[in-house]
Amino acid sequence: MASMNLTPKTKLFALLREYPFLVDFLAELNPKYEGLRNPVLRNTLGRTASLGKIAALGGLDVGELLSAIQAEIARQAGDELSFETEGLPLTREQRRAVLKDIIADLHAGADADMLKQRFAELIEDVGAGEVAEMEQELIDAGMPQSEITRLCDVHLEIFRDSLADQPLPEMPAGHPVHTFMAENAALLKVAEQLRGLLEGLGDPPSGDSLTGRKAELEPLLEMIALVDLHYLRKENQLFPFLEKHGVSGPPQVMWTIHDQVRAHLRQARQALSDSAAEYFAAELSEGLRKLVDMVDKEQMVLLPMALERLSEEEWLQVWRGEEHIGFALIERGTDWPPPELAQQAAVAEPVRSSAQTAPPAEPAGFASVLLNFQTGVLTPEQANLLFNHLPVEISFTDENHIVRYFSEGRERIFPRSPGVIGRSVEKCHPPRSVHMVREILSAFERGERDVAEFWLELSGRFIHIRYFAVRDAAGRFRGTMEVVQDVTAIRALEGQRKLLEWE
């Protein structure tokens, strides 16, 4: 290494392998490099990141960074490395300005192929997270999120070639990133099978060909529908942590596309049931296209960006909440977390008793705590059991609309995970319904309404959803309670039953 020059294109991984003391040096040089102490991040970001990219991530002038590294290597190792300053990449600010100009021109109707060429000429070594950061800045600057969503596919196409050159991170089996990627691989296999069957339906698709392939299509449609679990874990576990790191716009854009995929797959299943061949083919084709494009954006942008930002402790929290929702087509690996983190997870796991399992023993001193209600006294364990045995799902947000609690009954109608605790309730709903949430909460706050209710049919069940304004004795708004109940069996009741009849 001593005979080589330092350049903006020098890979960080090779440099740290030769001079490991640079890990501590860089972490102390800039707080944004603190994550390099994490070996997982070094083996992912470090393998692909150049010093030019590292300078951009830290908001530093690349020439100054190279000079500082050169001096530290000379001081600690005695190696006199030279560095080249010609052809330095654009600064972070310049790069972001070009990225935003490209997207702004795209929205103004400029030719996508021309913009793609402009991107290739002006931008080198683009970071996986910079596309998402750029989208966030455009939203913050006033560009409607709907506009970002509308052209999200074109954004990805413009940046695809550059991002595809960056190898996917290699994570141990069980790490949330590995799990997301393993699910994507399984979902892509099912999508490919479905595309093959679609091609056999003819052009235009005929009802007879659809009927003939129905037995093959039905199980594959059930399998691809499990993408909902993949999306739910992103929305309820990963997105909250990205929001804590200031990244909220791109997740909301992704959530909108998730809902589009869900809708297309749902309509395709209904069309298959109705033997509507052309409608089935159109809906399934579009749903699969959006699903595959979302895989690309996850693996090229979202997951590398999340690895750059989330700490190992935050990934542990993501991991802990995953089983509350479930997995799509795979079983989660067992090579992660490492023993020391697994022990931390066991210690941090809250005491929780659901209606499905026997309650664990309460920690010493916990049983002596009493909760004094207006109409009785309960221990925390009794209160937890009581809430979790209610024949309804309840959740509570405080007067600032922050999620503080949700119950865990036998059967979840709408899966939730610990990642929603402490999150703004607006972030817990799909973008298409946020305006409705705001309207309800505003009416509750103003004292104009106390209840809002909805009902819908979901997978053959009739679901009743009610929101209640929670007010204290003085009538002040203190929060909102959501109550969700499967009333299918209740609606079917007839006559009367006065005697005990066990079923």
Image (cartoon, rainbow, N blue to C red):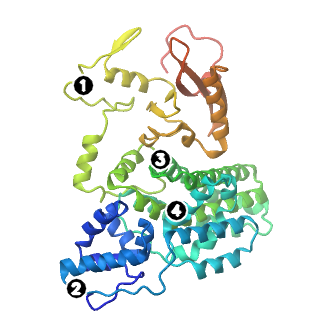
In the structure shown, which secondary structural element does the residue marked by tag 2 occupy? Answer: loop
Q: Residue at x 40, y 45 (%)?
A: 321
Distance of mark 3 from mark 1, alpha carbons? 30 Å
Q: Position of residue 191 (x, y in %)?
A: 59, 64
Q: Mark 3 and mark 2 in contact (Cβ < 8 Å)?
A: no
> For this rendering, which residue is in front, 358 or 173?
173
Q: Residues within 10 Å of mark 3 (few under 14, many from 20)?
A: many
Q: Position of residue 408 (x, y in %)?
A: 43, 32
Q: Earlier in the sequence, mark 1 or mark 4?
A: 4
Residue indicated by mark 4: 298
Residue type beneath disc 4 = Glu
Q: Check the picture and name the quadrant holding the N terminus.
A: bottom left
Distance of mark 2 from mark 1, alpha carbons? 59 Å
Q: Nearer the viewer, mark 2 or mark 1?
A: 2
In the picture, the disc for residue 240 is 3
Q: Is residue 105 above or below residue 86?
A: above
Q: Residues within 10 Å of mark 4 (few under 14, many from 20)?
A: many
Residue indicated by mark 1: 366
Residue type beneath disc 1 = Phe
Q: Earlier in the sequence, mark 3 or mark 1?
A: 3
Q: Nearer the viewer, mark 2 or mark 3?
A: 2
Q: Earlier in the sequence, mark 2 or mark 1?
A: 2
Q: How many numbered circles are shown?
A: 4
